[in-house]
Image (cartoon, rainbow, N blue to C red):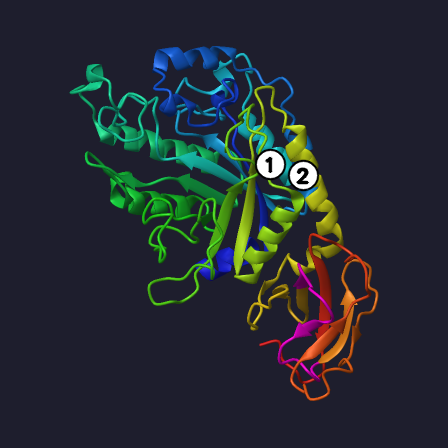
Amino acid sequence: MTAPDRLTGFSNDRFGLFLHFGLYSIPARGEWVQSNERITAEEYRRYFEQFNPREYRPREWAKLAKECGMRYAVMTAKHHDGFCLFDSELTDFKSTNTPAGRDLIREYVEAFRAEGIRVGLYYSLLDWHHPDYPAYGDKQHPMRDEEAYRGIPQDFSNYLRYFHGQVRELLTNYGKIDLMWFDFSYQDSVNDMTGEKWGATELIRMIRSLQPDIVLNDRMGGHTGSIHPTLQYGDFVSPEQYLPPKGMTDENGSPIPWEACVTLNDHWGYCAADRNYKQPKEIIRALVECVSKNGNLIVNVGPDALGVIPEPAADILRRVGAWMRKNGESITGCRAAEYEKPEWGRFTQGRDRLYAHIFDRGIGPVILPGMAGRIRSARLLCDGSEVSVARPWNQPDNDSDAFLNLPSGPMPDESDTVVVLELEKGESLL
């Protein structure tokens, strides 16, 4: 299957849920706590011995994602700390050996499949637990500055066999996996942890042999902050914590598939003190912006140590879902429109409809530049009510623009009022 064929479902879905969950949910200071606080493996093991998310109910997560209008999900099978939420035969550092005694990935996969949501797995290329992963001098490792780790014999090929073996397990033991999300390549003064350092070509060949339809991100090579990233090792690029101004393009300026990954607050993993949540309007507008630039949006939540998505996060997602139930037609299966970004919001387009996403209409009618005589009908997407399209009395000489005359007073939806436009016969959306 070619990359465009593999990407059809992914690009149509547009909206996904990211789930960062692991041992770091217990200290509750974010997913980088072991590195940031230079916690040794011995000290960190106490979280392994305590791990028992007795409220872990992925069916509830899946129902929440579906309610929110999300069409796919990605969950951490292994994060940088090396702890596995699946029953790997290659390590003892896994959830089945904790007080939880459960294969949490299997439960996640089954729950999200049951709701018709595409299933993705996150796997960190880093591993601070494995003895053959670079430690001293590495810019990420918790023991990077500890002299006791200088000169310890290591064989990185052992780690590669381990890492490739675990990917094989994930793509063999859990049925169809729709998406694999690797994280991440980097360089420092000691190590070049990019591309073939990971055995990327061999790994991709193995992945494609096991699951030909799977979609892959591109973090084994390139750089997530690059203006012109490469798709050498994957199908889409993944800008993190920002929305690219004009979508993502290669060095020739040609559009490439992309997905913006953003946190709902300021951390990926659970952080008890972080209550700086983005509001529903911000998520809705970010989603619209991504689709208007031919991109996806995946929004992350970090469940707490008991396995519960924090209620403030769940409430925000439910409120986004209320908007999606009325307006999801303008997101799912949609793409960028062949019109310049208007000053009042954005356009998206589906197969035969154009959607005007009105964020701030200003005073007077909403101007649709260059669309005079082209609009057959206009309706509010949320309730189907007609919107008048007529040239106002004080624009007698303007025969190029069309005008939406919305009722005075508050907009139907302050987050984003969507007007669906049907064009006259013979008028093309392109």
Quick one: label 2 or label 1, which is nearer the N terminus? Answer: 1
Residue farthest left in this picture: 151
15 shown above or below 44? below
Whether the magenta-drawn stretch holds residue 199 is answered as no
44 shown above or below 15? above
Q: Position of residue 175 (x, y in %)?
A: 54, 38
- Give whichever of 55, 27 is nearer the camera: 27
For residue 252, what is the image quadrant?
bottom left
What residue would you read off at disc 1? 277
285 with respect to 176 (left or right): right
Magenta: main secondary structure:
loop
- Three-letter amino acid code of the residue under disc 1: Tyr
- Three-letter amino acid code of the residue under disc 2: Ile
Give the SS element for disc 1: loop
Q: How crowded is mark 1: few (under 14 residues within 10 Å), some or many (20 or more)?
A: some
Residue 241 visible within the image: yes
- Give whichever of 71, 295 is nearer the camera: 295
Q: Which mark is residue 4?
A: none
95 with respect to 284 (left or right): left
Is mark 2 in CB contact (under 8 Å) with mark 1?
yes
Q: Where is residue 415 in the image (x, y as percent from the top left)?
A: 69, 52
292 shown above or below 260? below
For residue 67, what is the image quadrant?
top right
- Check the picture and name the quadrant holding the C terminus: bottom right
What residue would you read off at disc 2? 316
Stretch in magenta? 357-374
6 with respect to 229 (left or right): right
Q: Where is residue 375 in the image (x, y as percent from the top left)?
A: 72, 79
Give the SS element for disc 2: helix
